[in-house]
Structure formats: structure tokens, C-alpha cells
Amino acid sequence: MLSVDRRWLYLILFVNIVIFLLAPLRMPASISPPVQKFYDEIEKLQPGDLVMISSNWSASTLAENQPQLEAVITHLMRKQARFTIISIEAQSRDISYRLAERITKEKGYQYGEQWAHFGFVPNLAVAIKGMVTDLPNTIKQDVRGIEVTKLPVVQGVKSLSDYKMIIDVTPSGTVPVWISYSPKNVKILYCPTSVMAAEAYTYLDSGQIKGMITGAKGAQEYEQLLGIKGLGAPFANTISFSHLLIIFFILLGNFAMLMNRLQARREA
Amino acid sequence: MGMITNLMAQQTIWRLPEESRALFATLIVAGAFVLILGLIPVLQTLPPRGRRAIIVTVTFLAGLFFAAEFFLPVDWTAIFPKDDPKRNFLTPAIQPAQNVLQIIGALALGLGTFGLVRLHLRNAVQKRPQWGYSIVLLVSFVVMATLSILNTLAEKEIVERGPVLERAFSILFDYTLVQLDAAMFSLIAFYIFSAAYRAFRIRSVEASILMFTAMLVMIGVVPLGAQISPALPTIANWVLAQLNAPAQRAIEFGVGIGGLAMAIRLWLSLERGVT
């Protein structure tokens, strides 16, 4: 049993993913405290409040970060908050811009008036320090080539401290950088991939992060809180059964090892 | 000294006058260009010790600037009464420093691109083993770069976004690059599955505790856990917040101290391979 061809294992996982991705089975999630805190913080926003979204994900973590970003933008639009997006990942500049453009168009949110995309900025720490000192001179232009000073959405904004909130949607360890250099009056919310979430619990505990949406399953919880149907639910259901399958095979592997040992003892 | 103090007090030392900014900028760029062109042959004639001295000095000064800006007291008004209490005298220079770093970053990107293209062009021209892949890379590079540049120009309304450009960019970016990238990363799931089956073994008490906890969290954090028992998500969250967080904090302290030591070594050019 231990020497099974790994291609069989791949096939089993593949079939499992396809079945549960396509099956109309939808299980409700229990809302975890970090997601509830995230939701409550955005609920506190007033119409017109300004939020910075740091979108640093590329296609490789699309399955986790896209449902997060979609849910967050939907909630911000529902609260009539203004938001700007910035990317320190070159591919994310296009992905997040196209995604935000699609969602905002559906809801009639005006580019330039209610939201804007600042494009790709290399070197996060330096960019944050620059934005804290002088945001318009650091960013200079948005993705459409419009000078930041001429964008109504950030009219009168001089620095990052004029924002109410920063939301970091990322598969990388960027949140400590935001915590280190951001103004203390700006709240930080975090949307990591599942694998990065464990590290962030220290910041949640200390209050440096006000809330967290963990991967696709966090996105599912958020969609549930918002009452919308998004990508998070099917992805989280698929992950559920994949986890179950992995646990089953870990137990099976250990059982096989135990049987081998028993057999070896008997033969000895 | 008095003039410098005055300039610092007025926060103008790092800022050019508005009316002559374009002229100054042109002169600085032209001067830097001439200086670099002149410096390269001079630097190449230097012995290794001389090169090392230059690298060490530049690294130290650059590090000193950022450290000093961060650590110097913010309220500088006791020394310079006209100064802004929200920043010290180095703070206004952060913006130009950021521009310099961005330019260096862009240069590094250009250098990397140049190296990649040169290597694969050589592979293709000399028909080295697997030169066909180099052709694929070069064609993909040129096509994707061209369409991306056109798309960016269209976003800035410098060129018109026609249906051909829209469709071609969408096919290459949304339906090819994004999908390939996502597919590549998804392969990890299959390796994890295979590795978990083959390698996750109960060989000791510690391994048993680890496996039991991992299973509890794996099933507790997903929707299926809540369906099995409402207690499972609570237990999983407790493990993450009460057991995982202190352990992570301890690790981060260690990493932080290590990072600080490494940063000081780099700053003082004590690391190997500086030259």
C-alpha cells in the first residue's frame, strides 16, 4: 500500500476537486472571530471615508485572493466608502485593476470620483514612507495617467494619515511592513492566503491588525456576512473535502506503516 | 554654516525653486549622465581595494541616511524654531531618495531583461541544446511586452483601444498568462497530498501531537468542520490564537534579532562578496 504509484494519488485528488467544485453542495461556514472583526471594522466606516487597498497578488494565488478582494470591494461600495488601490507586484497591477473595474462598473461606482488605481509601485517600505510624507508626489499618476492631485477621489489628501484604513490583500509577508511604517491613526486589515495567516495571529492579538480574512474559506465567511454569492463558497467547499481526503490518506499511510511493522515483527 | 541652518529651518535644502525646477532637473540628469559615463572607465581601472572602498562608503552612507532619518527625534523645533514639528531635517529628502531607489529598481529590471534576452538569443543563434524553448521564450517576451505596452498606453488614452488590442491582450493576459500561473501554483496541492500520505508518520509522541493538532485545525477551519461539530471551529480558533500566536511571536523575535544582525553586517560591509 505504501508503494502506490503517486499518479493514482494525484488522480484521486483531481477527481475530488472537480466533483466538489462542480457539485451544487454549499455548506454554511461558521464565522471565525478575525473575519467578524474585519466585517465590523468596515461597518464602522462612514460614507466618503477613504480606504487604501494594497493588492499584491498574482495569478498564482488567485483562488484565495480574488474572492477576498471581490468581497472587500463589494462591502466598501455598499458603505459608500472611497478607495484607492496600489500594487507592489507587477502582475497584480493589471489583475486588480481589471477586477476592480469590472466590479465597480456593475455597481455604477465612478472611477476617479469614488475609486482609483495608483498602479505598480516597487519597494513597499520606501513607497509607504513616501506616502506618509507626501502621497501625491510619491504616486504622481494613476494607471490612466491622470495626476493624483487632479483625482477627485483623493482631493485634498496629502499623506497616508488622511486615510481611515489600509487593507492588505496579499500572499506575501507585507503586513509587517505596513504595520512598521503606516501612520498610527490608520487601521490595518489583512487578507492573507491560508498559509500566511498563522503568522498574523500575533498582530491580531496585539491589535496591530484589526481583522483578517483567511484565504478562500475566510472569503466564504465574508460573503456569508454580506449575503452575496461569490467564488469563496465553492472554493471553500472544495478545500473542505480536500482536507478530509488528505486526513484520510495520512491515517491510511500510518495504518499501512503499522501493518508493515507488525508483519516484519511476525516474520522476525 | 548660518546659510545651511537657515535652509534647514526653511525646509528648502532638498527642494528646488518651482520656477527653475525644470532647468535644474535637466542639468542634474545631464550631469549625472556625463558623470556616470566618465566614471565607468575610471572605476574599471581601480584596483579591487579601491572598488571595495567606494562600495563600502556608498553602502554606509545610504544606510546611515535611512537610519538617521528614522531614529532622529521628530520634533526639531528646539534647534530650528521655524521647523515643522512633524519631521526632522532629513525627512524632506525621503522623497528624492525614494525616486533614486525606484530608478535603481527599474535599472535592475532592465538589466535582468537584457541578460535574459541575451542568453536566449545566444542559445537560439548557436542552436544550443533545447534552443527551441529559447525561441518560444523570445517570441512570448516580444509579443507580451508589445501588447502590454500598448495596453498601458491605451489605459492612459495615448493610443486608441481598438477591439483587436482588447481581444489580443485579453487572450494573452487573462486566458493564457493568468491561467498558466494559477495552474503552476495549483500543482503544489498534488505534491502536498502525495507528501502527506508518504511522509506524515507517527514515529514519536511529538509527531503524534503534531499530527493530531494539524488534523484538528485542518478540519476545524473549513466549513465541513462546523457541520461535523460546532465545537471543532472553536477548538481550531483556540489553537490558532492561543497556541500558534505565542509560538509565532517567539519565532518572530528570533527572526527579528537575526535580521537586525544581518542588516548591520550588510550596512558595515562585513558580509562576504562585497566586491
Image (cartoon, coloured by chain):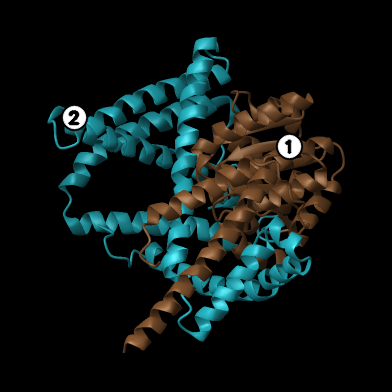
Chain colours: A brown, B cyan
Residue B216 shows up from this direction: yes
* Residue B218 x %, y %: 62, 64
Q: Which label belongs to residue B124?
A: 2
Q: Kindly indicate the quadrant of the structure image that contains residue A79.
A: top right
Compare residues A268 and B267 and report the one nearer the observer.
A268
Pick the quarter of the image with the C terminus of chain B: bottom left
Residue extending farthest to the left is B126
Report the residue at 26% width, 34% height from top: B37
Asked whether, in this view, residue A12 is left or right of residue B88, the answer is: left
Q: Are marks 2 and 1 in contact (CB under 8 Å)?
A: no
* Residue at numbered disc 1: A83
Q: Are marks 2 and 1 on the same chain?
A: no
Report the residue at 29% width, 28% height from top: B136
* Residue B256 x %, y %: 52, 69
Q: Nearer the viewer, mark 2 or mark 1?
A: 2
- Rounded to the nearest angstrom, the CA distance separating label 2 from label 1 is 47 Å
Report the residue at 51% width, 20% height from top: B151
